[in-house]
Image (cartoon, rainbow, N blue to C red):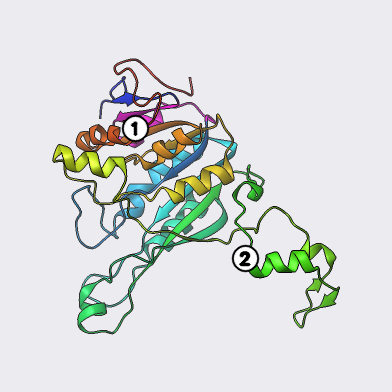
Amino acid sequence: MHIQPEPIYKTEFGALFCADGLEFMRRMPDDSVDLVLTSPPYALHFKKEYGNVNQQDYIAWFLPFTREIKRIIKPSGSFVLNLGGAWQPGSPIRSLYHYRVLLALADEVGFDLAQEFFWFNPAKMPAPAEWVNVRRIRVKDSVEYIFWLVKDPMAKADNRKVLQPYSEDMKRLIKRGVKETIRPSGHVINGTFARDQGGSIPPNLIQCGNNESNSAYIKESKIAGNKIHPARFPAELPRFFMEFLTNSGDLVLDPFAGSNTTGYVAEGLKRKWVGVELRNDYAQESRLRFEGLPEEGVVAQGQSFLPFT
């Protein structure tokens, strides 16, 4: 597929291209990206309008993308992949496709798994309806998988940039202090345990809903009478990983940009970004995310823009 040489739009920090993500990445230089953060179409049983590959063919379809991702990220960079689970067609049995993808990324592509994360969406609808709502033999599936993959085990990361507020109990403990003791588990508790470190280290469970009913993107899409992208990425996920794994000025790539939440979050965090979306309607519509920005917003169109060159 021919890659459009000009972006659909560009902003102060990035640009959105309408192109095939695989072909686009093949034109990018080695070791040029600090973070690839994406959520490709899942291997769901039911076909979605944005396009998705079945479970049997998913690995063969997806691995060429990941080989290019491994080539273009820096040794200090990271690849963050969000994949949702799926069910076996016609049976209350879970698919193992996402685990097979992870194993293929390690065994065939050569990535290391730095850590697995879990996205808990408390607002997720109960499904599949037959097993959860009708027969009542399963519970709703509210967790998706996020795999943080690296080329170098010591890739750039700093959890001090994503510290969370202390609980009230921890605040009281910091104020009161602790006596040195040994827990039944053998863990030694000493005075440093109650030292104020600026916040608590976050867990690998991220809780956030996948809704943005009050966002400018949703409002403007409705005003324009456009159909809203059916599988939008919640902003909290890219925000967490960009703050955790990148610095201001680093380059972030999303080769399955969709409604371009990744680019929007990167813009606010002053990261350079490139989004690639295959469908022109989604690519065009995603510009609405930037029209509400107070200053630059979407800037001149039709001008060549590649932050990594």
For numbered disc 2, what is the local secondary structure?
A: loop
Is residue 300 shown in magenta? no
Left or right: residue 114 versus residue 278 is: right
- Residue 184 found in image quarter: bottom right
Q: Which residue is mark 2?
A: 167
Left or right: residue 255 versus residue 308 is: left
**Spatial separation of the CA atoms under disc 2 and disc 1:** 35 Å
Q: Which one is nearer the viewer's eye here, 22 or 6?
A: 6
- Residue 291 found in image quarter: top left
Left or right: residue 56 versus residue 130 is: right
How packed is label 2: few (under 14 Cα within 10 Å), some, or many (20 or more)? few
- Residue 182 found in image quarter: bottom right
Residue 165 screen position, x and y as percent: 61, 57
Residue at the image position 28 percent from the left and 78 percent from the top? 92
How packed is label 1: few (under 14 Cα within 10 Å), some, or many (20 or more)? many
Is residue 110 visible from the viewing direction of this image?
A: no
Residue 75 screen position, x and y as percent: 60, 37
Residue 202 screen position, x and y as percent: 59, 58
Q: Are marks 2 and 1 in contact (CB under 8 Å)?
A: no
Residue at the image position 29 percent from the left and 55 percent from the top? 57
State the count of labels: 2
**In the rendered view of the protein, which quadrant contains the N terminus?**
top left
Q: Which mark is residue 290?
A: 1
Looking at the picture, which amino acid does disc 2 mark?
Ser
Chain part drawn in magenta: 13-32
Is residue 123 visible from the viewing direction of this image?
A: yes
Give the label, 2 or 1, closer to the camera. Answer: 2
